[in-house]
Image: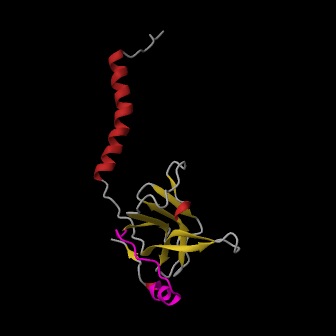
């Protein structure tokens, strides 16, 4: 009859270190030696403005909003917008080619979903726009907003002339 084979405490400790240390070592080696892939840039334009929202005359409200313009010839899906790297809003329908999407600032919520963007109390310094482009990749654009925003246009002529102005492009 063969005697039972056992391992010592030292052998068990070495085996445990190897079973845990080898996969962690491979992961660290991959993270240090794998080249970083650049994120595709999103050629969008951003503008802060006021727009009328609502279906009927009784429910219409003039709200501050952020407008994103798709300057490409392809549609974007799963649009996400971030304000000041703290407040976010999603537009799952995305933006059609050449179109503009406007989102009221009151729709932005902190990452955990408990705090809404304090409209009127906080300046917007940075805007980050994420979207899925036609290749399936997730593209990103980051914008630094000007410190002084342009005054609203009072007449329809001034508003029509400003339609192509006041857009902020990515840095």
Magenta range is 145-163
Question: Residue 9: percent from the left, percent from the top?
Answer: 35, 16
Task: Kindly identify the residue that appears in the image at 54 percent across and 72 percent down.
Answer: 102
Task: Kindly identify the residue that appears in the image at 56 percent across and 61 percent down.
Answer: 107
- 112 and 15: which is toward the camera: 112
Farthest left residue in view: 33
Q: Is residue 147 magenta?
A: yes
In this rendering, the answer to whether 22 lies above or below 86 is above
Q: Answer with left or right where residue 54 lies relative to residue 73.
A: right
Q: Quadrant of the C terminus?
A: bottom left
Question: Residue 129: percent from the left, percent from the top?
Answer: 45, 66
In this rendering, the answer to whether 80 lies above or below 99 is above
- 132 and 15: which is toward the camera: 132
Question: Residue 106: percent from the left, percent from the top?
Answer: 54, 61
In this rendering, the answer to whether 19 lies above or below 99 is above
Task: Kindly identify the residue that appears in the image at 42 percent across and 64 percent down.
Answer: 128
Farthest front residue in view: 154
Q: How many marks?
A: 0
Q: Is residue 51 magenta?
A: no
The answer to which image quadrant residue 43 occupies is bottom left
Question: Residue 35: percent from the left, percent from the top?
Answer: 30, 58
Task: Kindly identify the residue that appears in the image at 42 percent across and 71 percent down.
Answer: 42
- 105 and 13: which is toward the camera: 105
- 40 and 16: which is toward the camera: 40
User: What colour scheme does the image use?
Assistant: secondary structure
């Amino acid at each position: 009859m063969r005697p039972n084979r056992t391992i010592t405490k030292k052998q068990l400790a070495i085996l445990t270190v190897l079973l845990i240390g080898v996969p962690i070592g491979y992961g660290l080696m991959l993270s240090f030696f794998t080249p970083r892939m650049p994120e595709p840039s999103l050629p969008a334009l951003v503008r802060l403005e006021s727009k009328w929202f609502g279906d009927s005359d009784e429910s219409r409200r003039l709200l501050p909003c952020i407008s994103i313009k798709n300057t490409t010839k392809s549609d974007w899906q799963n649009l996400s917008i971030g304000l000041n790297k703290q407040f976010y809003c999603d537009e799952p329908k995305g933006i059609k080619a050449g179109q503009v999407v406007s989102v009221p600032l009151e729709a932005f919520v902190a990452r955990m979903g408990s705090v809404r963007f304090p409209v009127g109390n906080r300046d917007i310094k940075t805007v980050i726009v994420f979207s899925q482009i036609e290749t399936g990749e997730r593209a990103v654009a980051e914008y630094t907003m000007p410190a002084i925003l342009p005054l609203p246009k009072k007449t329809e002529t001034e508003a029509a002339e400003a339609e192509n102005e006041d857009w902020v492009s990515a840095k």
